[in-house]
Amino acid sequence: MRLTTFGVGYVGLVTGTGLAEIGHQVLCLDVDAEKVARLERGEIPIYEPGLGDLVKRNERSGRLHFSTQLTAPYDQSELYFIAVGTPPLPDGSADLRAVFSACETIATTAKKAALVVVKSTVPVGTCDLVQERLEELAPGRFEVVSNPEFLKEGSALEDFFKPDRIVVGAKSDRAKATMRTLYAPLQLNGERLVITDPLSSELVKYASNTMLAMRVSFMNELSRLCHVTGANIHSVRAGVGADSRIGRKFLYAGPGYGGSCFPKDVQALAALGRAKGVPLRLAEATHLANDDQALFLVNLVRESLGSLEGKRIAFWGLAFKPETDDVREAPSLKLAEALLDAGAHVVGHDPEGAKNFVKALNRDGVSVVDSEYDALNGSHAVIVLTEWRCYRAPDFAEIRARLAGDRPVALDARNIWSPAEVEASGLHYVGIGVPSTARARS
Ligand SMILES: NC(=O)c1ccc[n+]([C@@H]2O[C@H](COP(=O)([O-])OP(=O)(O)OC[C@H]3O[C@@H](n4cnc5c(N)ncnc54)[C@H](O)[C@@H]3O)[C@@H](O)[C@H]2O)c1
């Protein structure tokens, strides 16, 4: 089939490349001329494991193209995928301007009838509004399908080729059949399609992200309770997660969730509830609890270091999670803001996200280094904010030797280190709801 994706971000580029890889002719279109130019030069504007090789292979095969314009022959695509950003507006609701702009380009440029597939995360009812707009501009030519994206940054290709589920919200049998055909090659070992109406499909996406965020926020709240009671969040997680009705996944306390999806999707669902007169109290609380966790982390640093004025603090991990360069809404940004405001200096390391971190923060008092150990030189504390594999089994004696002070602080905001091992090296261990051995003994 001939296909076009709008947006060459994390979703659009992975989707377009994946569809080319299984044999389709694909144009990836973006209004960002610089991103398109980089892709045309063979550079990948984002870090996603395996993506660079796949893009190059499919470009060489002639199945994958990049452009800022919808030009022939892709103005005769059978499907147009909208994978543009839907960032939050100040009231938490989703900004849909890019979605409608893409829809208008399709309506005014496409030369034949086609499906318009909305992959962007959009509030319930958006596909109907997109359909209305298309009818105004080009009556009877397009049908809108909801097909929310569930990929996880860091394993996006794996998620594309082996999805847990593919959710399709469509009205006509023809649209449902086309989507079934499109995704059949990804389900050779068993169908994982959930076919429903567009409204339900749109809600599945928000419900899934909010449910996951809610688990994280609940464990974060429990970690704060552990902190004051002396209970250990590791044991709590093991005990709670052993219940097969609950399961072990997404029960990790940490610095609060971040990224381009959870924060905005939780808020957008809450905003939708408010707009429709159905208060979604759990979504509201999930968001508030996440903000509280960011404050808790700042207080942990203060509690461990005293005055922050003039202190130098090393961050290990800047991306919102491992295996991505994405720092949108990352805990590292919130913490850095607070520490800089208090007069500290931050020196960061991240295998992929350092450049984006500096750009997003855009403040003095911050530097980044290429080696994680170099971030420690003369610092008063190290804080692990992202559980990249390279931070999991470090040389604690080396950390101790490079940090300043008698008993420097190792704040393990991802709970990946053994308190006993860290403390045996002469460091002061601080975890999230994990008693240090000193506290556990007292
Ligand atoms: N990133 C994720 O992990 C993820 C996962 C699932 C769903 N989503 C959802 O998918 C959507 C895209 O997310 P993303 O992370 O890929 O965003 P992104 O910000 O990485 O990329 C969006 C791209 O869309 C482009 N764009 C904006 N307006 C355009 C237009 N009119 N025509 C063509 N291109 C246009 C931008 O220039 C940008 O390159 C969002 O709604 C997001 O919530 C994201």
Image: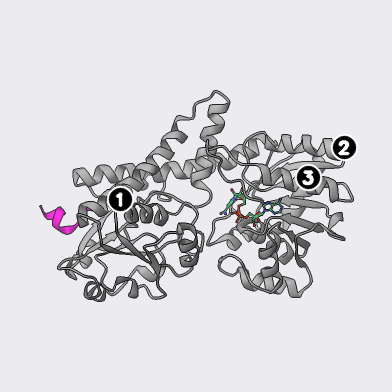
What residue does disc 3 label?
A: 104
384 magenta-colored: no
Q: Is residue 244 in sight in this rendering?
A: no
Q: What amino acid does circle 2 point to?
A: Pro
Q: Is mark 3 within 8 Å of ligand 1?
A: no
Q: Quadrant of residue 51?
A: bottom right
What residue does disc 1 label?
A: 298
Q: CA distance from mark 1 to mark 2?
A: 55 Å
Q: Residue furthest left?
A: 442
In this rendering, position of residue 177 left or right of residue 47? right
435 magenta-colored: yes
Q: Position of residue 290 (x, y in %)?
A: 39, 43
Q: Quadrant of residue 374?
A: bottom left
What residue does disc 2 label?
A: 139
Q: Cβ–Cβ below 8 Å for labels 1 and 2?
A: no
In this rendering, position of residue 377 left or right of residue 45? left
Residue at the image point whose x is 19% and y is 57% from the top: 436
Task: Give the structural element (helix, strand or loop) at label 1.
Answer: helix
Q: Which residues are magenta?
A: 434-442
Q: Residue furthest right?
A: 111
Which class describes the residues within 10 Å of circle 3: few (<14), some (14-19), or many (20+)?
A: some
Does 410 sit above or below residue 272? Answer: below
Q: Which of 349 and 220 lies nearest the eye of the viewer?
A: 349
Q: What amino acid does circle 3 point to?
A: Glu
Residue at the image point whose x is 66% and y is 61% from the top: 13
Q: CA distance from mark 1 to mark 3?
A: 45 Å
Q: Position of residue 365 (x, y in %)?
A: 36, 63
Q: Is residue 396 in sight in this rendering?
A: yes
**Marks 2 and 3: which is nearer the front?**
3
